Image: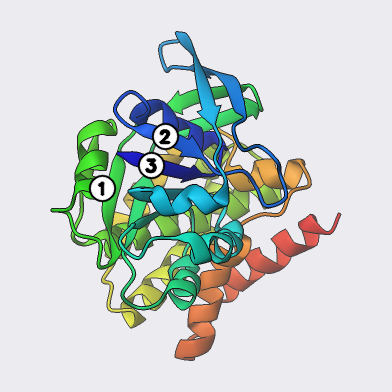
Amino acid sequence: MNIVMIGAGAMGSLLHQQLDAYHQVHFLPKPGQQEFGFTETYQFTHLNGNTEQLVRRYIKVEQIGQADMVICALKAYQVKGAVEYIAPFLSPDCPLVLQHNGMGVFQQVRQALGDNYKLGLLLSTQGARRVEDEQVLHTGKGNWQLGSYQAFDVRDNPAAALLNHLQDCSWYPSIREIQWTKLAVNCVINPLTAIYDVLNGELNNDRFTDIIDALINEVVVQAKVEKINLEPERLRNTIYQVIRQTAGNSSSMREDILAHRQSEIEFINGYIVNCAQHSGRAAPQNQWCVTQINQLQKK
């Protein structure tokens, strides 16, 4: 299968490593970059410490029409621009699979491609980190969760390719509930670790209990408006389990703030704030997180 990957970051490289042995995987360069025909070698380090050399191969955007599947593994705020860039060249039969944090991206992509375009969603509990252009680390064992945003069929070849060749990948008909659960985890861990400049495990401290509970309750309320029922105590247990399991990790948002990069706050806590504005139900704790992160991004 001819797969085109948009995004050569940590998750895009992890997908590349797992799919490259079975399919032709090419990368799309950023607009304006002259990398057609260019190959880029990088070192991939497995969980057991073993390393291998992999090669990223780049194509022209005009060639994307030959793809059997396109996977977009970008920051949430980058997806809209990337989709608008490739839209004129996409085949109407080629599904687009989105791999991103947060929520609100689907609405932007559907506006660009239409209500009937095949859109898949790929969530992950895998851990990966790109140290530099030439080195990617697989930092945490997890699984892939595949589902449909719209018109993406589990019986079609693209879905089968991901289910068969990604490590621990399963199909989830109720992918939206899983996405909301992941959003809740991100609404707690990402902003709090960035605001207080701590590793994930520090959130297990009692001083964070009240703020975590408030964030959880606000997410549950907005999920219910979207007809997603999240059980607060179960969600709380899930979040604290992730905190414990990733205790030594630095969240992606904390890393973004430390590196003076744009964060995904508008698609995480900001999404809850937007939902609250439409539903007429306040989400003050999520709004506080958005305000604090935006202030940190200006420094």
Residue 282 vs 124, above or below: the answer is below
Give me the C-alpha separation between circle 2 and circle 3: 5 Å
Question: Which residue lies at the image location 49% right of the left edge and 60% below the top edge?
Answer: 89
Viewer can see residue 3 = yes
Viewer can see residue 247 = no
Q: What amino acid is found at the position of numbered circle 1 in the picture? A: Pro
Q: What amino acid is found at the position of numbered circle 2 in the picture? A: Val
Q: Is residue 150 left or right of residue 183?
A: left
Query: Which quadrant of the rendered structure holds the N terminus?
Result: top left
Q: Nearer the viewer, residue 163 or 251?
A: 163
Residue 165 vs 114, above or below: the answer is above
Residue at the disc numbered 3: 3
**Which residue appears farthest toward the top when viewing the image?**
50
Q: What amino acid is found at the position of numbered circle 3 in the picture? A: Ile
Q: Residues within 10 Å of mark 3 (few under 14, many from 20)?
A: many
Q: Secondary structure at mark 3?
A: strand
Question: Which residue lies at the image location 44% right of the left edge and 44% below the top edge?
Answer: 4
User: Which of the two labelled residues, at mark 2 and mark 3, occupies the earlier sequence position?
Assistant: 3
Residue 20: image x %, image y %? 37, 27
Question: Which residue lies at the image location 50% right of the left edge and 72% below the top edge?
Answer: 108
Question: Which residue lies at the image location 78% right of the left edge and 56% below the top edge?
Answer: 296
On residue 172, the disc is none
Residue 17: image x %, image y %? 41, 26
Label 1 with label 2: CB-CB less than 8 Å = no
Residue at the disc numbered 1: 158
Label 2 with label 3: CB-CB less than 8 Å = yes
Q: Is residue 137 left or right of residue 163?
A: right
Q: Residues within 10 Å of mark 2 (few under 14, many from 20)?
A: many
Q: Is residue 253 left or right of residue 282?
A: right
Residue at the disc numbered 2: 25
Give me the C-alpha separation between circle 1 and circle 2: 13 Å
